Amino acid sequence: MDQLQDYIDSHEENELYPSEIANILRQLNDSEFSEALKLVPKGLLGDVALALPDRYFDDVIENLSVDEISHAVSELESDDQVEFMQGLEEIDEEKASEVFEALHEDDKQEITQLQKYSDDEAGAYMQLEIFTAHKDEIVQDVIKRFARLRKENELENVQNLFIVNKDHKLRFVVGLDDLLIFDFAKTVIENIEQSSEKFDPISAEDRDDIKDVVRMFEEYDLSVLAIINAYGVLQGRITSDDVYDVIQDDATEQMYNLAGVNDEAEDDDEILNAGKKRATWLGINLFTAIVASLVIGIFADTLASVVALAILMPIVASMGGNAGTQTLTVVVRQLALGDISQGDAMRIIKKELTIALGNGLIFAIIMGIIAFIWFDMKLLGVVIALSMIINLLMAGLFGAAVPLFLKRLDIDPAIGSTVILTTVTDVVGFFSFLGLATWILI
């Protein structure tokens, strides 16, 4: 707590960073957290709460009154206000209702407007605080208005001026650096028409998928993007910090899905809830493991006759599993980044099969020699070599095909892919190895 006090004392209020305050708060125990929260400037409470991990949000809400929460919400930008209110509703609907009623009418209207969008739509991530100017306005008047709004803290992180017509339809986007070299005595449109620069707007519609918006940021190297409705009317803007959050959340979700866990459940403090989600996939894994064991059981006599097979058998399954996981991870990530188009399926599968065949041949030779030297059985080396080639080929095929197939069905490619792949590599690995051993050695 002393560290937080020292940090606040050594900085002016406008130099305080919510993320740094959040990092200090995370190091405190429950009693210290409650006391330290009282030291945080009221205007930063909302930003600090959102900067903290989700499990701390409950503690923040419990230690603040309705008036304190409503003030904290009012200091946030519109997109952050919605995020805060959604988190509050999940904890305490009654308190959320009281906070909402305590807000200014403008804030309530903006929150209501943004809440009509679903989580995968661009409109859910936009800020309504935008700096606009009419195309026929004098540049000097525009700059004076911007200066006034900025001094009154009505605008933050402004990089662009959005130029609209009388119907508020987006016409141009002008960077503030370009605005400063305009002729101040002329109108905005006169400057644009006389300039050699292009000010055509890059925009997205409010109902567009947020993943498409993320790709636009990457493709055009944007720091801010105008959001319009289906009629071209300017609605708001999405900034790069919101896009970074989307990318991070998407990457986290993919990693969790590949591991068979639920990202929302893992962020929750409810151990039982997280345990249930994990148990679901563990149950499926248990079933697939039993299937693989049944395959082994078919060849019980072969295993009893050649004990060396039991020693080498895990190597085949392990190599196939690792090779498949490599392919699966690459394909899932490329799908997420939009690097694979709809017509790329066969190209990807051919590529992965070629890599699998190359690696299969290399490690088949290595393992065949090792098996021969280890157990002094030439045919055993042939068996494990052939089995390794078969299993790595199947790992490459299914590691690429499964996520591509799930994507075609509009299912997250990361969900269930690992379980399917593990089943295939285990079953194929054991069946090919023991089946070839039965055919060649027995």
Image (cartoon, rainbow, N blue to C red):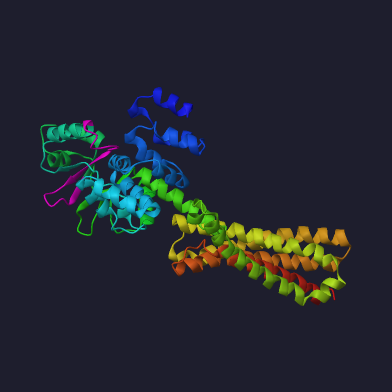
Question: Residue at coordinates 65% horizontally, 58% vertically from top-left?
Answer: 322
Q: With respect to residue 428, does 253 lie above or below?
A: above
Q: With respect to residue 192, does 318 lie above or below?
A: below
Q: In the rendering, at what x and y percent does residue 285 appear? A: 63, 66
Answer whether residue 159 is magenta in the image. Answer: yes
Q: Which of 52 and 309 is in front in this view?
A: 52
Residue 244 visible? The answer is yes
Q: Nearer the viewer, residue 218 or 227?
A: 227
Q: In this view, does 393 lie to the left or right of 37?
A: right
Q: In the rendering, at what x and y percent does residue 55 appear? A: 47, 47
Q: In this view, does 7 lie to the left or right of 288?
A: left
Q: Nearer the viewer, residue 382 or 22?
A: 22
Q: In this view, does 233 lie to the left or right of 127?
A: left
Residues shaded magenta: 151-172
Q: In the rendering, at what x and y percent does residue 421 appear? A: 61, 65
Q: In which quarter of the image is residue 390?
A: bottom right
- Quadrant location, the C terminus: bottom right
Answer whether residue 224 is magenta in the image. Answer: no
Extreme residue in the right direction: 376
Q: In which quarter of the image is residue 207?
A: bottom left
Q: Nearer the viewer, residue 313 or 109?
A: 109
